[in-house]
Image (spheres, rainbow, N blue to C red):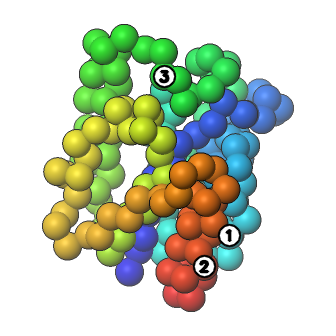
Amino acid sequence: MKKLIMVSGSTRLIKNPPQPIPAIQRFDGVFIRLIRKYYRQTRNLDILILSPVYGLISGEEKIEFKEPIGESWRELNLDSNTISKIRESNLKKLTKWLSKRKYTEIYVNIGKNMLKLIEGFEKIVPQTTNITYAQGPGIGPKMAHMKNWIESRICKT
């Protein structure tokens, strides 16, 4: 069965080429790099990337370079109205995405501030789908948790 990883994009982006390339290639944060390491050797895996600039997008969606908002998305400097609009748009996209695909498990590696942009998504995920959240007090432990999740669930299928 298929699995889904939902991950925050990072403010670290590949600028060149400026023309659209897949989001999984455009974003260059540590979590995306880890996913890229395994992505081509896996089957039954979809990636959704969450960004305040692009919204919730597929890892395969081709995007052009856009400047990130601020230096870090840990501090999401958006007013509550903007966050609500982005959240509504993202939840609509996710609802449409999930209506076309079935997953046994969703792995979520999204920081608490970015999580505001998809807050309530659990309500639209089928009850038969397990949701696993990245565990750990910082980037290193979350990287190890995500790597273990990928290796134990994705690389074996």
Give the mark nearest the N terminus, 2 or 3: 3
Relative to 125, 139 lies left or right? right
Give the mark nearest the N terminus, 2 or 1: 1
Residue 18 image offset from top left, x and y in percent: 77, 27
- Secondary structure type for disc 2: helix
Task: Please give the name of the residue rendered at 36% of the width and 32% of the height, measured from the top-left corner.
Answer: 117
Relative to 110, 126 lies left or right? left
Q: Nearer the viewer, mark 2 or mark 1?
A: 2
Relative to 22, 122 lies left or right? left
Query: Can you identify the residue that label 3 sits on?
Result: 76
Q: Nearer the viewer, mark 2 or mark 3?
A: 3
Q: Nearer the viewer, mark 1 or mark 3?
A: 3
Q: Compare residues 32 and 138 and report the one nearer the observer.
A: 138
Give the mark nearest the N terminus, 1 or 3: 1
Residue 84 image offset from top left, x and y in percent: 27, 22
Task: Please give the name of the residue rendered at 53% of the width and 57% of the height, measured from the top-left corner.
Answer: 136
**Amino acid type of disc 2?**
Glu
10 Å crowding of disc 2: few (<14), some (14-19), many (20+): some
Q: From the viewer's perspective, is residue 126 above or below residue 139?
A: below
Quarter of the image holding residue 114? top left
Query: Can you identify the residue that label 2 sits on?
Result: 151
**Amino acid type of disc 1?**
Tyr
